[in-house]
Amino acid sequence: MNYFTVHARRAVIALTAAVGLAVAGLGAAAPAGAASTARAHHHHVTWTRSCAVPKKRGYMACNALRVTSGTTATSKAAGRVSGLSANAAAAATPSGYGPTDIQSAYNLGSAAASNGSGETVAIVDAMDDPNAESDLAAYRSQYGLPACTSAGGCFSKVDQTGGTSYPTADSGWAGEISLDLDMVSATCPNCNILLVEANSASMDDLGTAVNEAVSLGASFVSNSYGGSESSSDSGYDSSYFNHPGVAITASAGDAGYGVEYPAASPYVTAVGGTSLSADSSSRGWTESVWGTTAGGNGTGSGCSQYSSKPSWQTDTGCSGRTVADVSAVADPATGVAVYDTYGASGWNVYGGTSASSPIIASVYALAGTPGSSTVPASDAYANTSSLYDVTSGANGTCSPSYLCNAGAGYDGPTGLGTPNGTAAFTG
């Protein structure tokens, strides 16, 4: 077990009368997965993997981590709800960061309010979440976001071939789906959302779902899952991820220093994870690498054994593809609020790079449709001044040290940094 730190007070986990649902605790029934522990700035946090680690090569696990007990970061919006006392407002605000926090931390406020209309962010996951649309509605209602429904054309759910023969329902992947849908909603409230559910967690089924998302018109596709690298990856690249003009993001992983696929693909934006805390700086927030030098838990990073280095990466300590490119909040101890009722009991706090991947996909959407022949993963490398550089923290021990230690400029765990508006995510 590893130990992290974050200054935070726990907000009471409750629903407001607006959604008319009962109070939900952090100790909801856990899906299959191993529990882990983190220490967050003097407070103890325990969490469990939403999805079990795959037992076969070529299969993926989702990178969602659900907090089961302890003190997590408090939304800056708590205590500012109109007409309520500070204590009452905190009680009415689910624990974990919400849309206002994410938009504030990454300087997206005006962009989130005015951009994204007409853009479609696709979420690719395995298995079915029968409650996806109703849970999404509860999340958006809680935070006063515009409705996003299938009847209104904003939300769509399809199987991996674009139909409605949905795969078997799975409570672990349902938690992942809720996390993904809520993070798109929080980051780009005006975006349309397309959920494509793969028949299984095999890379072939998930890859087929990626292709379907693109064929249905999504210019932004988030993949919050990963598995071991292999010699098959180049085949997966050409079959599933080589889509010029489409911003495809992939989680860097939750097991500390080390590389996962598809984050290692040169056709995707590999998204690392940070610990995000409010502070008194002009930005109002501070970030460090999610992880410790002990490794084991935290964002993934490193040098790919199988994928070649894309032309836009210029770090010299890795001859192959280096992970990550950019990053966003992922530490469960500074996690995000998520609403999930399939195998869970409503409001929970989630972390993992499954949170950061859909956030970054949605920032791309706020920035506008990519050029038809571009590789959007290269955009940030041409716009480094429009990112918050993360310079502290580590996710393991390695050589060369920048592959697992933050520092000025590019580093493995956080890439080039986190969004400071949308300018780094357009060609």
Image: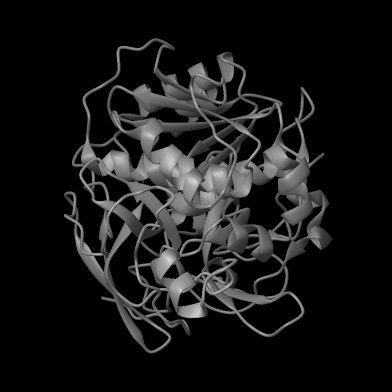
Q: Quadrant of residue 68?
A: bottom left
Kindly identify the residue that appears in the image at 71 percent across and 36 percent down: 116
Examine the image and state in which quarter residue 188 appears: top right
Which quadrant of the rendered structure holds the N terminus? bottom left
User: In this figure, what is the number of numbered marks?
Assistant: 0
Query: In the image, residue 421 lies at what x, y percent?
Result: 76, 55
Name the quarter where the C terminus is drawn.
Answer: top right
Left or right relative to 159: residue 336: right
- Can residue 405 be seen here? The reply is no
334, 141: nearer the viewer: 141
- Please tell me which residue is depicted at 73% across the width and 46% down the height of the picture: 113
- State the image coordinates of residue 105 (x, y, percent, origin top left): 65, 65
- The answer to whether residue 28 is above or below residue 170 is below
Q: Nearer the viewer, residue 328 or 96?
A: 96
The percent position of residue 276, horizontal first and vertical second, equals 55, 71
Is 423 positioned to the left or the right of 216 in the image? Answer: right
Q: Residue at x 44, y 50 (%)?
A: 18
State the residue at coordinates (60%, 66%).
Answer: 82
| Residue extending farthest bottom | 42
Residue 322 placed where, x, y %?
A: 58, 53
> In the drawing, does residue 412 fall left or right of residue 353?
right
Give the answer, above or below, for where 324 lies relative to 136.
below
Viewer can see residue 110? yes
